[in-house]
Amino acid sequence: MSKHYFDPRLKIFALNSNRPLAEKIAKAVGVELGKSSVSQFSDGEIQINIEESIRGSHVYLIQSTSSPVNDNLMELLIMVDALKRASAKTINVVMPYYGYARQDRKARAREPITAKLVANMLEKAGVTRMLTLDLHAVQIQGFFDIPVDHLMGAPLIADYFMDHGIQGDDVVVVSPDHGGVTRARKLAEYLKAPIAIIDKRRPKANVAEVMNIIGQVEGKICVLIDDMIDTAGTISLAANALQEAGAKEVYASCTHPVLSGPALERIEESAIKRLVVTDSIYLSDDRKIDKIDEISVGELIGDAIKRIHENKPVSPLFETKNR
């Protein structure tokens, strides 16, 4: 740690979902991770102990609700309750990956809106502020009646491609579906490149079929971008379609590498040359296949925490380092 943060009232705690990222965030802020322990009773119930005083402190709690999503969510809720009962002045949940974000509306009759339910539970538990990254549905910010700071991974992803000379007129940024056009446009703005869109039809959950490419990709370096990659069906089919349409090279990128089920095998067998992901979700070394390049959001989130604590704007973090 190069420099210790000036205010001892700022404390950062981590739970079990992504300890390596939490350590990077704490280092970026200039504090040690708070002392706490998470254990389980013999029947699987979660037990949490906070092992230092946090009375009057501004606590930032790091926890992605990735797989196992329900365990990580319960850990988070129980820890928030413990912090509240220990008289923390503010409880700021840093949730790089917001689980259940795909259930943000009633797409069919009698469906729940689980993203809203999660927001309700967090507020009821005692959270005073949320800090998150690339929500699957940006309207989830409106599910909360507390402040929500929503960071973007696109500047970091843009920096990766610019550092590798992938920018300009020879590049096309591709959205794998119509819903991701805004995200693709933002990355294209950073890379000074045009955009294209994959028009796909999804016959059932986690199964995608590429139908058409809107835009000129022949002879171009294509960069696919999505907020998350789960089973990798969409992104793999999109990459293969781009290759068949004459793309010179195909790269893919996402903020949240969920990578469940057959995802890694599909990526290995696809036309994707490199897959750029962030560490918002912990990936063990055995899951970091050769095609995957991981960039860290630790400094981004650390800078955001300092700005929030010092009542400074967060918007400057939406710029690339190369600008």
Image: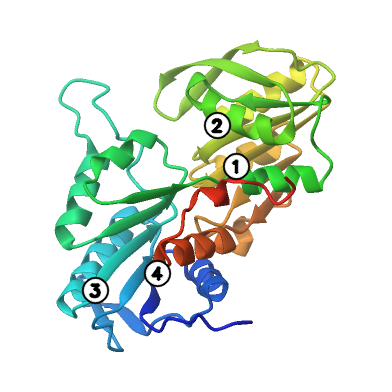
Whether the residues at callouts 2 and 1 have beta carbons within 8 Å, the answer is yes
Distance CA(mark 4)–CA(mark 1) = 26 Å
The answer to which of marks 3 and 2 sits earlier in the sequence is 3
**Above or below: residue 208 compared with residue 297:** above
Is label 1 in a helix, a strand or a loop? helix
Q: Mark 3 belongs to which amino acid?
A: Lys
Mark in front: 4 vs 1: 1
Q: Position of residue 38 (x, y in %)?
A: 31, 77
Q: Earlier in the sequence, mark 4 or mark 3?
A: 4
Distance between mark 2 and mark 1 Cα atoms: 8 Å
Question: Which of the two residues, 8 or 80, is positioned nearer the viewer here?
Answer: 8
The first of marks 3 and 1 along the sequence is 3
Scheme of image coloration: rainbow
Q: Which residue is mark 3?
A: 89
At a point 24% along the width and 45% down the height, the residue shown is: 144
**Residue drawn where x is 81% and y is 30% of the image:** 168
Q: CA distance from mark 2 to mark 4?
A: 30 Å
Rate crowding at label 4 as few (under 14), some (14 to 19) or many (20 or more) other CA atoms within 10 Å: some
Q: Residue furthest bottom?
A: 52
| Residue linked to disc 4 | 16
Q: Quick one: 211 or 97, which is closer to the camera? A: 97
Residue at 33% across, 82% down: 37
Are circles 4 and 1 on residues that touch, CB within 8 Å?
A: no
Quadrant in which the N terminus is drawn: bottom right
| Residues at discs 3 and 2 in contact (Cβ within 8 Å) | no
Q: Earlier in the sequence, mark 2 or mark 4?
A: 4
Q: Secondary structure at mark 4?
A: loop
Q: Which residue is mark 2?
A: 183
Horizontal side of residue 226 vs 295, given as left or right = left
Which numbered disc, 4 or 1, marks the residue that appears first in the sequence? 4
